[in-house]
Image (cartoon, grey):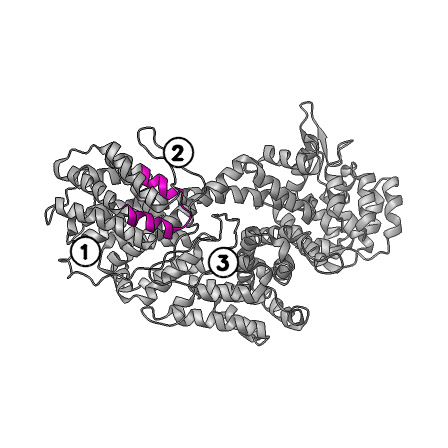
Amino acid sequence: MIDGLRRRFLPPPPPPPAPKKEAPAPQPAKKPAGFSGRSTFEAPARAPVVLTPPATPRPVAPAATHVAARTDGTATGGASTVRDASRAVEAAYTSGGAKAAAAELRSQTEALTDPAQVDRLLAAAQPTIDRISTDLANGVRNNRVDLATNRDVLRDLDAAVSRAGQAGRDAVATSVAKKLSEAVPQGSAQLGRFDDALVELARDGVGGTLSSAVAEKLINDFGRVEAGNAVLDTSVDAINEVRADYEAKAEELTQVETRLNEELAQLGPALTPEEIEKFKEAFWARDENADIRDAARAAGDTLSETLAASTAELEALAAQGDAGATKALFDGYKALAETPNHADEALQFAGRINQDAGLAEALSKEYGGDFEQKLSDEILAPAVPNAQAEAIAEAGEGGFDVAMKEFSALVKGLKTAHSLTNIPGDVQQMLTDIRDIRAGTFTQDKVQEMLDAWGNESPLGRSLAVATLGLGLYDLPSQLADGEYLEAIKNTLSSSADGIELTAGILDTLGKTGAATDVAKFGAKFVPLLGLGADAIQAYQDVQALRDGVSAGDVFNLAGSVVSLAGDIAGFVPVAGTAVDVVATVAGEALRAVGGLLNGDLGPDLEDFSLDEVTDILQNTLGLSEAEVQLLVGNTKSGYGKQLQALGLEPLQIRELLTQTEPPLFAFSDALGSYEPLGDARFLFETLAAFGMSGDAAFEFIQEHGNALSAFEQLDDANPFAPLEATLDGAISTGDFSAYREEALRWLPPEIIEDLEPYLDAPANTEFFEP
C-alpha cells in the first residue's frame, strides 16, 4: 500500500439504492477528435442535451486500429460472433489466468465498433470476468498477486469498459467491487497492490473509468466506504493527471499560436489575404507546430473522454458529499470550458448542476455560498463563447438558424432556474436578445445599455454580451446588414473603449470558428462581423479618448483576429465586386493598424520572431530568397509596411519595394551578408504624403528615389529658422501644406524636385498623418 493517499470520511452508507435505470447505449460520435486554439473544429451531428448520465465523450466508437496481442498472453483479436469472442476470453483464462484473459478481453473489445456490441460481449463473458475479479480480490486478501499483474489486468479491464456502454461498465464494476467487498473487512481501506497498481496507472492518466465505477459500487452497493474511498482516490488522481497534461499542452499550443499571430501581424502589409491563408497553412504543416497542435488536441480529447467515462459515478459520489470527486469534476470541466471543441460539455455539466439539487448542494458546500458566482466566472464565462463558436462551425452552410438551434440545445439545462438562481435568467435574456437582433428590434439604445453596463459586468456578463452580438450578427440577413441597422450598431460599438473591448471579444470568438472548419462553405456569412473589427480599429486610431481608454495590446490582438479571420475567408467568398472586396478592404485596414502598432514598442521582438521559420515559409509559399526575407522582416519591423499602405500601395507593391535587393532601397549589405538600415524611410513617406502623392505614382517615385533617404532626412531640420507654417508640424496642424512644399523644394536634389513639382497644388494625404 502506498502511503499518503487521501482518505475521506463519509457518513454511514445509505440503505441499498433502488435499481439504477440503465442508460441507453451511447451512439458513436460523428465528430472526429480535435482541439486547436486557433484550434480546428470538425462538425458532429449534435445530440440533444443529456442531463443524466452525462454526455458520452467524442469519439465513442473505437478506432479501427487493432492493438497487437501481448507476447505473454493469448490475445488474438475479434471473433466472428459474441459467443466466439467470449469463448476466446475463457480459453485465455484457462491457459494464462487473469492476465491473459484481461488482455484477450481488451483485444476483443477493440475489434468492435459499437458500445452496444461491447456490452453484449461483456455480458457473454461475465463468468470469466467474475473469475478475473476473484483473482484480483484474492490478491488483496493474501497479497499473492504481484504489482505488475495487477497493473496489467486493471489496465486491460479499464480499456475494455471504456469502450462499453453504461450497462457494460456497471457489469464489470459490480463484479470487481463484489469480489473486493468479500475480501476487505468493513472499515478497512487496505487494498494492497490492487490500489497501488491503480495509483501507477493514474500517473499515466489511465484507469479512471474502471476505478470510479468500482468506487461507486463499493460505497453505495456494498457498504465498503473506506475501501471505496481508497479506489476513488486513484480515479480522481487519473482525472487530475489528464487535466494537468492537457493544460500543459494547451499552454504550449498558445505559445505557438501567439508566434503565428506575431509573424502574420508583422508581415501582413506585404501579403494579400490569400497569401496570409497560405502562410498559415504552411505554418501548421511544419512538423514541430503540427505536433504541438495535435498533442493539445489529443490531450483535450483524452480529458473529455476520461471525464465523461467517470462523470456519472463521480457526480453521484459528489452529491453524497465526497470532496475529492467534487473538486475533480469542477476542475476537469473548468479546463474543458477553455477548449473550443469540448466547451459544450462544460455547459452541459453546468446544466446538470442546475437540474440536480444534491450535486449543486455538494458543490456549494465545497466552494462556499458564492459557488454560483464561481461557476459563472470560471466555467460558464469561457465556455459560452467557445461553445458558440463550435455551434457556428458545426452549422456550416446552415447559417444562423442551425447555429442557433445547436447553441440553444447546449444551454437547455440552464434556461429555467432550479438549483441555480441567477444564471438561468441571464442565459434566457441572451437568447431573447439574439432573436431580437435577427428581427431588427435590438435598437441602438439597447447596444448602448450593454456598453454602459460593460465596466461593471462579471466575466459571465461580458461573455453573454459577446455571445449575444456574435451570434446575433453572424450571417445577418442582407436587408439588415446592408442598411442603417448594422451601421448604427457598428457606430455605437466604435464610440467607446468598452465597445472596442466588446468587439475584440466578438472577433476573437468568431476567429476561432474561422480556424475551426472549412470556411470555404460559408465564409461570406462572416463579412458583417469583419466590418465591426475594421470600424473599431479605425476608431482607435482616430479618437484620442479611445486611445487613452484602450491598451494598444488589446487593439493589436483585435487586429490579429480580423487579419486571421479575413485570411480564412479570402478566396472563399463571392467573386470580386461583392463580398470579396469587403474582405480585402477589412484585411487592409486591420493590417494598417497592426503596422502602426508595430512602429513602436508593441511589436514582437526579433528574438521572439522565428526568422528560420519565416524564411522557410516565405521561400516555399512566395519563392523569396533568404536575402529578400531578411529585408522584408527588417522593413516590416520598422513599420514601413503600414506607412506604405497609408500611401495607398497594394500588398504586392509593398513587397516588391521592401524586398528589393539590387540595390536594397532602405538598407545596405555588410561584409557578412547581413542587411543594416540605410536610414529612416519615414521622412520619404511623409514627404510624399505632404505632396499628395499616392498609389501607383508613389510606388514609382519610391522605386526611383528610395535609395536617397538622406536627402529626405535632412528636411527634418534643414532650416531651423523656418517659420512654423513652413514646417511639417505646422502644415499638419493647419492643413495648409503649400509653405512646407516650397521649403522642401529648396533643399531636395533637382531630380527629386522635378518629380515633385507636378504635385504642388495636389490635396495632401492628411490621413497619413493621423495617429
Q: Amino acid at mark 2?
A: Ala
Q: Residue at x 42, y 70 (%)?
A: 426
The magenta region covers 104-125
Which residue lies under the disc numbered 1?
221
Which residue lies under the disc numbered 2?
68
Residue nearer the viewer, 81 or 674? 81
Q: Amino acid at mark 3?
A: Ala
The nearer-to-camera label among 1 and 2 is 2
Which residue lies under the disc numbered 3?
45
Magenta stretch: includes residue 113: yes
Binning the other alpha carbons within 10 Å of mark 1 as few (below 14), some (14 to 19) or many (20 upward) gives: many
Q: Amino acid at mark 1?
A: Asp
Residue nearer the viewer, 355 or 193? 193
| Residue 507 position in % (x across, y down) | 56, 57
Q: Quadrant of the C terminus?
A: bottom right
| Residue 710 position in % (x across, y down) | 76, 37
In the figure, is residue 704 to the left or right of 598?
A: right
Q: Residue furthest bottom?
A: 441
The nearer-to-camera label among 2 and 3 is 2
What secondary structure is the magenta-colored segment mainly?
helix
- Tell me if label 1 and label 3 are in contact, CB under 8 Å: no
As helix, strand or loop, the secondary structure at mark 3 comes to loop
Magenta stretch: includes residue 570: no
Sequence-earlier tag: 1 or 3: 3
Q: Is residue 276 above or below residue 374?
A: above
Binning the other alpha carbons within 10 Å of mark 2 as few (below 14), some (14 to 19) or many (20 upward) gives: few
Q: Is residue 455 visible?
A: no
